[in-house]
Image: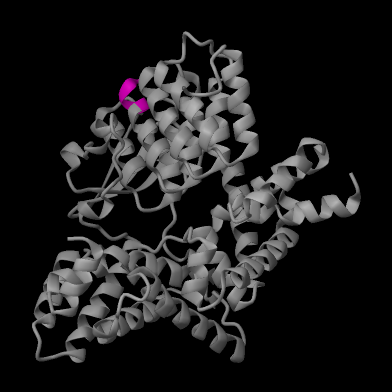
Amino acid sequence: MSEMNCKNIREQFALLLYGELSFDEEERIDSHLDGCAECRAALARQKVLHEAVDAAAVTPSPALLNRCRENLAEMLPREKPASGWANWWSQIAGNWKIQVLRPVGAVALLAIGFFAAKVTPGLSGVASMGLGDFGGAQVRNVAAQPDGTLRIVFDEKRERTISGTRDDQRIRQLLMAAAKEATDPGLRAQTVTILVGDANESDVREALAFAMANDENTNVRLKAMEGLQRYANDPMVQNALAHVLLNDPNSGMRTRVIDALTGHDGQELDRQMVGALQELMSREDDSDVRERARQMLHSIKASAETY
Amino acid sequence: MDETELIRAAQAGDSSAFEELVRTYDQSVLRLALSMLRSPEDARDVYQETFLRVYRNLHQFRFDCSFHTWLYRIATNLCLDQLRRRKVRREEPTVMTTPDGTLDRMDAAPETRVEGDPQRNLFSGQIRKRVKEALAQLTPRERMVFELRHYEGLRLRKIGEVLGTSEEAAKNCLFRATQKMRTALGEFV
């Protein structure tokens, strides 16, 4: 391969990963990659970089959102004082009002509807999971203690702290709720990482599967998948992996699903998973993912096409 | 009620319809403003001004584009104006000096970390810091296109509509932005 050609190809990698190249442009790159190991390695590095940028994603705090809504509620009546807007807006602001707790550093509480999570068919048990005895609570800190217990801080009407081991049902409830509902993606990722240690329990696997299939943060989804890889024989986990395979926007996640399945023979994979792999072959844009899916289907002696 | 019906109802003065529109989009607008401006105060100003303008001008909305595009056009213009003003008065640092040392205002909100994996936390913290620095090196337009594509997930055609330019120009802008990001962050991969 000429250096000039490789340089031109590599310059297109970012747009390729965003899916912003034309069919012909992608074909040209695919064709080049087939014969150029260095560019394939460069593309893999570009994917790592692409995902690293996710680390700087910003999520507004509930308190900031609350302040914005309150300010807007104050401003709107001045815009149109004679109308009914002011009245309804005050009502909205009241409904949206977030209780900012004391002392300084306490985080805001949000109405539970704010966290309206996306629900995956078959995973609704997790979606409806609440905080039980801690109804309405918002987990804001999880810390591992030197003695092996976990210290969890959460807000309700007042701040409370509980300590206990992972097998304590209250601790388990709070961890699973935080994995689903916490606004801070860092906290969700940490909670998921802790839950991975109990992935042999089916309720924990359900919580991890929910995070893997639904969390908006790639890092959280990835951690959940890492925890579930050992349990790829579980039909519920396969169901969630099939969902990720066909719906996750991140090609790295899709690749890891196939990696998680590698080593399983056809009898261990349920029909839905095989169907998902076959469907992937017809709709996957990423040539690397497509090739892995093809090899996977070949290894379990399944057709790469649907009829 | 679908979005078109919601907008028509809001134009006719239906309060719950306007509420629904705000509820649908206000977190995205705030996230975009915060991500672009890296200042909670400035993001709050952009949020407020965006929805005030929507409120004032909704009766003029003629469905020539989607409501989302129209809303983002207002929000992105306000963000770009703010960034350009900053350039004039020198970039306003997010890091400020306090009696306890330097503090990045973007990190002021309590951030929780499990203490069990300090090495990984440290590495992701380093990446986050470097990405923020690399983003700060982009021009306002490059920064906007990059934010809209990478973090908001808008297609280039839509970004062109939002910014009042062509898809090709948005593509060129994204290309430049990603080249700069790769140069700045290349050592991490």
Q: Residue A255 is drawn in which quadrant?
A: top right
In the depicted structure, whether residue B31 falls above or below residue B139: above
- Residue sitting at the far right: A2
Q: Residue at x 52, y 81 (%)?
A: B80
- Say whether residue A162 is left or right of residue B94: left
Residue A113 visible in image: yes
| Residue at 56%, 12% in the rendered image | A300
Identify the colour scheme used. Answer: one colour
Q: How many marks?
A: 0
Residue B149 image position (x, y, % from top left): 53, 61
Query: In the image, which residues are magenta?
Result: A201-205
Q: Could you say which is closer to the camera, residue A247 or residue B25?
A: A247
Picture coordinates of residue A191 (x, y %)?
Answer: 41, 39
Q: Residue at x 26, y 38 (%)?
A: A127
Q: Quadrant of the N terminus of chain B?
A: bottom left
Does residue A244 appear left or right of residue A207 in this picture? Answer: right
Q: Quadrant of residue A44?
A: top right
